[in-house]
Amino acid sequence: MNIYITLDYEIYFGENHGTVEKCIIYPTSELMRIGEKHNVRFVFFVDCGFILKLDEYRKKYPQLEKDYELITSQVKQLSAAGHDIQLHIHPHWEDSFYNGERWVIDVKRYKLSDFNEHEISEIVTRYKKVLTDLTNKKIFAYRAGGWCLQPFSKLKKAFVENDISLDSSVFRNGFFETQQYAYDFRNAPDKDLYKFEDDVIVENKNGFFTELPISPIRNSPLFFWKLFLLGRKNPYLHKPLGDGRAMAAPGYRKKLLTRFTNNPVSVDGYNANLLQKALNKFQRKKLKHMVVIGHPKALSRYSIEKIEEFVVKNKTQHNFTTFEKEFLK
Ligand SMILES: [Zn+2]
């Protein structure tokens, strides 16, 4: 099976956004160490809106110069080492600013579809260019910020114009709607790869776009009780390495703790405990692709150990790979 470990490379978007060192640089350097040691490569979906903002404000606020340098040089380093750098858009950066002390993050337009088609085209073009300039490689794959890419028909033109032909944002049965978020993957095809055209959850064999969905998993409430309790009991091992807080998602935590939920297979924190179980299940189903999501900021010492263990156990039998290697023609 092809196994893609994908990381959304970003700071936090809550009141406390955290530091670049702890949310991004250090956890990513741990992944690079594992990649180097075991000769496997990962996919990084880089939040390029943040890089654009750092670039905009670093002349006025020299303290941001360091963050800009850290991120741009790590992205170049990742790319040079053979990790895949691809596009991750959080368009709320358009409305956010630095006040001299911290980022003031405005999420009232959190989804790309909150902008008009002209603005969407302009954003996708400008954000993609950041990564092309840093890597000198073809950027052709996309992961939507907060999984929000519906209605896709509104984004389609911008993606065609920019030759973004592969998406990896859907996880089957995922569903969440609040003021900011909106995604509904409840009717997504039960497949590990399909073509689509106007609607990201409707297969269209002649479609321009390919969907490589994030592998889905169903979690019991007990799993999340355990996850939260371990965080309290042994924070050294189980607390996220990132030092910020996620943006508010009203009702989300309660939902996880009270009923079965559909989630993406993840390397974040205690979720990494389920990697092997998920792989075994996909093997029984004879799937060809397993896509795992994660965030450097949400990795813990525990999950980093688990990722390494998972790689060591499976690297001879399976193919740890990137989108560039498998899909770029
Ligand atoms: Zn993101």
Image (cartoon, grey):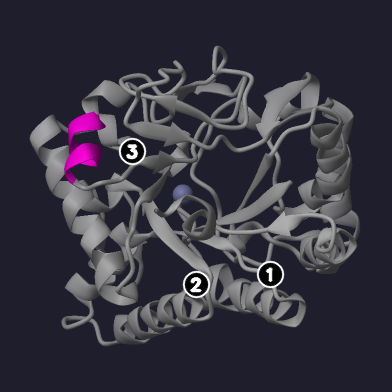
Q: Which residue type carries mark 1?
A: Val
Looking at the image, residue 12 sits to the left or right of residue 286; the answer is: left
Q: Position of residue 90 (x, y in %)?
A: 35, 48
The residue shown at (28%, 36%) is 112
| Residue type pointed to by label 3 | Tyr
Q: CA distance from mark 2 to mark 3?
A: 21 Å
Mark-to-mark CA distance, 1 and 2: 27 Å
Bounds of the magenta segment: 155-161
Look at the image and tell me whether residue 148 can be seen: no
Query: Can you say whether 206 is above or below 303 in the image?
Result: above
Mark whose residue sits in front, 1 or 2 = 1
Query: In which quarter of the view is residue 217 placed?
Result: top right
Dominant SS of magenta comes to helix
| Front disc: 2 or 3 | 3
| Residue wearing tag 1 | 40
Residue at left offset 37%, top offset 54% = 87
- Which mark sits nearer the N-terminus, 1 or 2? 2
Within 10 Å of the Cα at label 3, are there few (<14), some (14-19), or many (20+) other Cα atoms?
Answer: many
For marks 2 and 3 on the same chain, the one whose residue lies earlier in the sequence: 2
Farthest residue toward the top?
Answer: 187
SS state under label 2: loop
Numbered circles on residues, count: 3
Mark nearer the viewer, 3 or 1:
1
Label 2 CA crowd tier, 10 Å (few <14, some 14–19, many 20+)? some
Q: Earlier in the sequence, mark 3 or mark 1?
A: 1
Is residue 41 at least partly visible in the picture? yes
Q: Could you give the CA–CA distance between mark 3 and mark 1, rounded to whole angstroms?
A: 33 Å
Query: Within the magenta stretch, is there residue 293?
Result: no
* Residue matched to label 3: 110
Q: Is residue 288 above or below residue 77?
A: above
Residue located beneath label 2 in the image = 19
